[in-house]
Image (cartoon, rainbow, N blue to C red):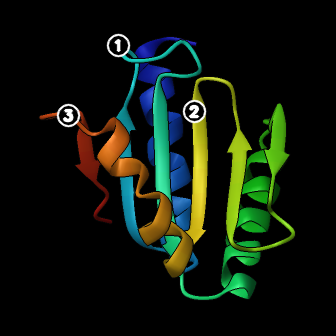
Amino acid sequence: MTMSEQKKLAEKICALLSAKKAEDILIIDVSGKTTLCDYFVIASGHSTTQVKALCDHVEEKLSEEGLEPRRSEGTREGRWGVLDYGDVIVHIFNDESRLFYHLERLWEEGGNATVYKD
């Protein structure tokens, strides 16, 4: 997948999250910082129920396009769901967990983070 395709996937995921009322959606380009992936998408849901629904929605819609996550973790508990699409890893937090882990602080550096606005 090219960097352009990876960015488009990250933006598509953001649009899917936004459609289900996720908040504080952020794309962080981590391509120069780790070999895990090239982009993180980070979003928040207000409750464990919403976090689960957001994870399910992204997984369902991308599956319809033939994209399956390599792995998923925490999606049933609803505190911090992770969907690994290879070049793009999606982190969906409830409000409390996002504040506690604050991934942005660890990965954001200068201009590598973009707030998603639909």
User: In which quadrant of the rendered image does the C terminus lie?
Assistant: bottom left
**Number of residue marks:** 3
Q: Amino acid at mark 1?
A: Gly
Mark 2 vs mark 3: give the one in front: 3
**Percent from the top left, x then y, of residue 67?**
78, 36
- Sort mark 2 into few (<14), some (14-19) or many (20+) by Cα contacts within 10 Å: many
Q: Position of residue 38 (x, y in %)?
A: 47, 22
Residue beneath label 3, please? 109
In percent of width and height, residue 39 lies at: 46, 32
Within-10-Å neighbours for mark 1: few <14, some 14–19, many 20+: few
Quadrant into which the N terminus falls: top right
Work out how far the residue at label 2 is from the one at label 3, CA to CA, in angstroms: 18 Å
**Element under label 2?**
strand
Q: Determine which quarter of the picture holds residue 3.
A: top left
Amino acid type at circle 2 is Val
Q: Residue at x 52, y 48 (%)?
A: 12
> Does label 1 or label 3 sit earlier along the sequence?
1
Give residue 32's mark. 1
Q: Which residue is mark 2?
A: 88
- Residue at 60 percent across and 38 percent down: it is 89
Give left or right: position of 90 versus 25.
right
Q: Position of residue 56 (x, y in %)?
A: 79, 66
Is residue 108 shown left or right of residue 54? left
The answer to whether 75 is drawn above or below residue 37 in the figure is below
